[in-house]
Amino acid sequence: MTGIFTQSPRTTALHAALSRFMDEHVYPNEAALYAQVAAGATRWKPLPLLEELKDKAKAAGLWNLFLPESDQGAGLTNLEYAPLCEVMGRSHWAPEIFNCSAPDTGNMEVLVRYGTPAQQERWLKPLLAGEIRSAFAMTEPAVASSDATNIATTIQRDGDHYVINGRKWWISGANDTRCKIMIVMGKTDPDNADRHRQQSMILVPTDTPGVTVKRPVPVFGYDDAPHGHAEVLFENVRVPVENILLGEGRGFEIAQGRLGPGRIHHCMRLIGASERALELTCQRLSSRVAFGKPIATQGVWHERIAEARIAIEQARLLTLKAAYMMDTVGNKVAKAEIAMIKVVAPNMACKVIDMAIQAHGGGGVSDDFPLAWAYANARTLRLADGPDEVHRAQLGKLELAKYR
Ligand SMILES: Cc1cc2nc3c(=O)[nH]c(=O)nc-3n(C[C@H](O)[C@H](O)[C@H](O)COP(=O)(O)OP(=O)(O)OC[C@H]3O[C@@H](n4cnc5c(N)ncnc54)[C@H](O)[C@@H]3O)c2cc1C
């Protein structure tokens, strides 16, 4: 299952149970889930079928499998979670069915690590139970947000409240009517000489006056309902001082703690999506005849399929190495490996899924196969959670620092 990295009997059993659940409940319901979105009176309401599948996953013990170093989840390490997250990445719907989808996983990790007991009671508990959803609001349309020191939203103290003003976009999950809480990043101390101490993170309930979800922002035309990515306006939004996370000026510290696990989870899921794309390619090419012979027997496809297999295996090994390092030396020391895999996995997935689209002819770009959406998703991950160039720049610096 994970090559040279041995798995425990417990995770081997979980992997088998998860794969069985996918075969029995997820793949057969994918078309019906898309149909429920299309038929919804509003596109942003919970899907009854998805909620049913969540109950089934919970009953099967396939719930909150993320959350390393915590007694709140399944207690798996990153290395143990990797093959499970990979299986979930095979389907658009699966991560949420197992309560393991972004941005909730990252937000739950923030609340576990940095939340006060009161914040955990109010927000973490219902998130872990899958009763509500959440969003993470950092990116802003007006500034280059890949450099988070640019984030300009203001968070100003006013007595026993903070007042928040700013405009965000690409806020995943904010359109969803179940989204009840946002973690918002902004500046509490814009004049601090240390640019990394200007920022804070604060909890903002979505029903606070002044919070307006302006519009869904589609990706290549997909609005990803009922989850989606929203533009959100904050106008004189007042929240109690207790809503600050960890304390003023600690936003960067939290962002670093949050982004490591979030990034590697995306990579794990992309490997699953690539495996499925390769599987569909082989099935499709073996079942169609062109110019007198099965397409699979045309030499060019042997070459492409071999390259895809090589690329997936390489990416998986690097993901597992990064997960192993996170478990053994911590997310901070593993930052080079996390940056490497965050570049490798989305680029690999884009190539493999693009090949699968080609193999499916016109069908590849339709919604009759999961490939077009998978490609759109993989492409966004060359931007989201840090564009490729930012990770490469960090890696270049780390490498050169060895020679100083
Ligand atoms: C589908 C999707 C979901 C998202 N979800 C969320 C979310 O839930 N919450 C949230 O806060 N944000 C979210 N984002 C936003 C995402 O994290 C940002 O788009 C990303 O950080 C880049 O910021 P930007 O768009 O402002 O690009 P910019 O900062 O304007 O960068 C533009 C380009 O400049 C180049 N560049 C930047 N830095 C360098 C460098 N050092 N060297 C060379 N070139 C460079 C890169 O090519 C980069 O793509 C999401 C984005 C997408 C597409």
Image (tube, rainbow, N blue to C red):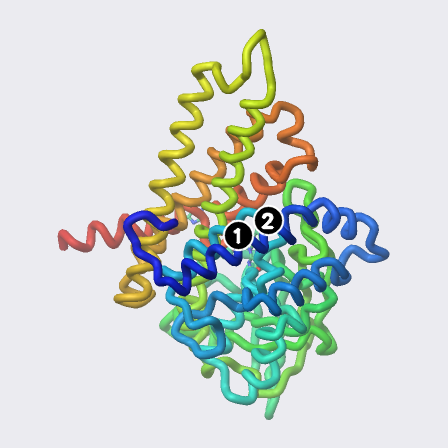
Amino acid carrying label 2: it is Asp
Q: Which mark is residue 273?
A: none
Query: Does the closest atom of ligand 1 sit within 8 Å of the Cβ of label 1?
Result: no
Amino acid carrying label 1: it is Ser
Report if residue 368 is visible in the image. Answer: yes
Report x, y in % for residue 1: 39, 49
Q: Residue 19 carries which label?
A: 1
Report x, y in % for residue 103: 56, 63
Report if residue 146 is visible in the image. Answer: no
User: What SS does tag 2 mark?
Assistant: helix
Residue, x 41% and y 65% (percent of image)?
10
> Residue at the bottom extreme?
159
The picture quadrant where one finds residue 207 is: bottom right
Q: Residues at badges 1 and 2 in contact (C-beta under 8 Å)?
A: yes
Residue assigned mark 2: 23
Q: Quadrant of the C terminus?
A: bottom left
User: What SS does tag 1 mark?
Assistant: helix
> Residue at the left extreme?
403
Q: Is residue 305 left or right of residue 102?
A: left
